[in-house]
Image (cartoon, grey):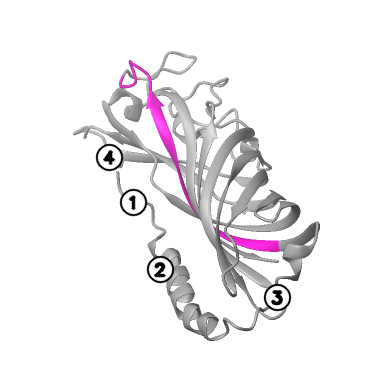
């Protein structure tokens, strides 16, 4: 499996942190910011870069041709399907933050986020000599999610103007884009879309660092997200959901959080 294309944002974040460390070390006798750490409740906002794809579970007979309600078989569907995969797709998110202090080293966080992150599933077919079609099809799952995560942040003791932390918890996400807007019941089989359920639960875990500045705190964060249950909506069979038994969403998220 090819690695998700998050190398450039991650490298930029690591470079920023490394460049910040010398100045933070020089200020070790001057503790900046930190006022939010003493408040029972405080607020903030966040920016997110996301790389996401589907983990696909195929049926036992996933290579069998698909026939529509009339029993007809399209040229693509008559060919032999030999691979179904989901390439990584990038997205962005903008969120708010509400933080409740539990102890000196633990906080409860609610971070509602609006995420724009389309997904894709590719279908590769064995070449068919008399067909002029491209031998690979892509079904785009259009998605704009409202994410509702509830997380616990476990912090180390503060060292000068920085500290590390681990974060984890659960999330419910709602897709506010309706697939019916792009998929008409009278469309040809090849123009249908792979459909997913409008909402799903997931768990997530990550690592980050708090950096304290004069008037605010900034936290670069890396996080892994894995959905729970089957996201596939197979109520309306078509050539794209025909070979699939199970869909699970996974993404890698690079975030900057300001408090």
Q: Is residue 60 left or right of residue 32?
A: left
**Helix, strand or loop for disc 2:** helix
Calculate the distance from the C-alpha at mark 1 to the C-alpha at mark 3: 38 Å
Q: Is residue 251 visible?
A: yes
Highlighted range, magenta: 45-63
Quadrant assignment for the N terminus? top left
In the rendered image, the vertical position of residue 154 relative to residue 137, given as above or below: below
Calculate the distance from the C-alpha at mark 1 to the C-alpha at mark 2: 15 Å
Q: Residue at x 65, y 45 (%)?
A: 151
**Helix, strand or loop for disc 1:** loop
Name the residue furthest left: 129
Calculate the distance from the C-alpha at mark 3 to the C-alpha at mark 2: 26 Å
Which residue position is annotated with label 3? 33
**Helix, strand or loop for disc 3:** loop
Residue mark closest to the camera, 4 vs 1? 1
Mark 1 neighbour class, 10 Å CA radius: few under 14, some 14 to 19, many 20 or more: few
In the rendered image, the vertical position of residue 104 relative to residue 214, given as above or below: above
Q: Residue at x 60, y 28 (%)?
A: 185
Report how many numbered discs are placed on residues in the image: 4
Instruction: Depth check: give the residue in front, 8 or 90.
Output: 8
Residue 50 is a magenta residue: yes
Which residue position is annotated with label 2? 11
Sequence-wise, the earlier of marks 2 and 4 is 2
Which residue position is annotated with label 1? 3
Contact, mark 3 vs mark 2 (Cβ under 8 Å): no
Quadrant assignment for the C terminus? bottom right
Instruction: Depth check: give the residue in front, 190 or 5.
Output: 5
Calculate the distance from the C-alpha at mark 4 to the C-alpha at mark 1: 32 Å
Residue 90 coordinates in the image, percent (x, y): 48, 55
Quarter holding residue 43: bottom right
């Amino acid at each position: 499996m090819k690695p998700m294309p998050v190398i450039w944002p991650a490298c930029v974040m690591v470079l920023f942190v490394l460049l910040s460390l010398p100045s933070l070390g020089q200020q070790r006798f001057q503790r900046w910011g930190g006022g939010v750490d003493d408040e029972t409740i405080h607020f903030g906002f966040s920016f997110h870069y996301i790389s996401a794809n589907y983990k696909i579970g195929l049926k036992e007979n996933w290579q069998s041709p698909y026939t529509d309600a009339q029993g007809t078989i399209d040229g693509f569907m008559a060919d032999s399907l030999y691979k179904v995969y989901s390439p990584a797709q990038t997205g962005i998110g903008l969120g708010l933050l509400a933080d409740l202090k539990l102890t000196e080293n633990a906080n409860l966080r609610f971070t509602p986020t609006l995420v724009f992150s389309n997904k894709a599933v590719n279908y590769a077919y064995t070449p068919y000599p008399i067909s002029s079609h491209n031998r690979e099809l892509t079904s785009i799952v259009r998605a704009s999610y409202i994410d509702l995560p509830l997380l616990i942040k476990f912090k180390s003791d503060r060292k000068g103007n920085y500290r590390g932390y681990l974060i984890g918890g659960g999330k419910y996400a709602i897709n506010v884009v309706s697939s019916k807007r792009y998929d008409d019941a009278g469309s040809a089989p090849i123009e249908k879309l792979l459909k997913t359920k409008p909402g799903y639960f997931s768990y997530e875990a990550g690592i980050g660092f708090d950096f304290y500045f004069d008037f605010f705190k900034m936290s670069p964060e890396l996080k892994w997200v894995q959905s729970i249950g089957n996201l596939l909506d197979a109520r309306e069979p078509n050539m794209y959901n025909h070979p699939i038994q199970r869909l699970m969403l996974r993404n890698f998220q690079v975030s900057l959080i300001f408090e």
